[in-house]
Image (cartoon, rainbow, N blue to C red):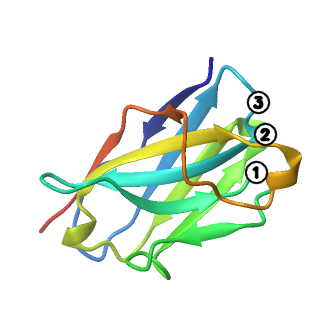
Amino acid sequence: QLQLVESGGGLVQPGGSLRLSCAVSGLSLDVYTIAWFRQAPGSEREGVSCISRSGERLDYADSVKGRFTISRDNAKNTVYLQMNSLKPEDTAVYYCAAERVTRLLRHRCVVQYDYWGQGTQVTVSS
């Protein structure tokens, strides 16, 4: 059973940075596509970023392009989300999610994810 644990959230001032980590255990990370989602109070969950199984395809929501960077370290079974130039509207609970994909889909992000972490709170406020 795959388990995902997010960390790195916290309170940061506007313009600041945070790096979220998603530690994966139970199975090897290298056959999974990984994504970050977020959900603010009263809002629907939205996709933030995705990294394909191969690591060659990176997708970002328009709202975070140029500010967030997703990366993966399969040797450490960890995926990261570097968040720079944070804005108050980035405040949300951030979740990582994983989906096992075949080699055929190794360069793609997917829409549906079967495995989810518990989330980490990010608050951007002065």
Q: Return the mark for residue 31.
A: 2
Question: Mark 3: which secondary structure?
Answer: loop
**Label 2 near label 3: C-beta < 8 Å?**
yes
The quadrant in which residue 24 appears is top right
Is residue 33 found left or right of 36 in the rendered image? right
For the point 32% across and 70% down, which residue is it? 16
Quarter of the image with the N terminus is top right
Q: How far across and how far down the image is residue 51, in percent? A: 65, 58
Is residue 67 found left or right of 44 in the rendered image? right
Q: Return the mark for residue 28.
A: 3
Q: Amino acid at mark 3?
A: Ser
For the point 43% across and 80% down, which residue is it? 62
Q: Gap between marks 3 and 2, in whole Å?
A: 7 Å
Q: Amino acid at mark 2?
A: Val
Quarter of the image with the C terminus is bottom left
Which label's residue is closer to the chain start, 1 or 2?
A: 2
- Using the image as rendered, state which of residue 9 and residue 25 is in the foreground: 25
**Label 2 near label 1: C-beta < 8 Å?**
yes
How busy is the neighbourhood of tag 1: few (under 14 within 10 Å), some, or many (20 plus)?
many
Q: How far across and how far down the image is residue 59, in percent? A: 59, 69
Q: Return the mark for residue 124.
A: none
Q: Return the mark for residue 53.
A: 1
Position of residue 122 relative to residue 83, above or below, is above
Asked whether the viewer can see residue 110, the reply is yes
For the point 65% across and 68% down, which residue is it? 58
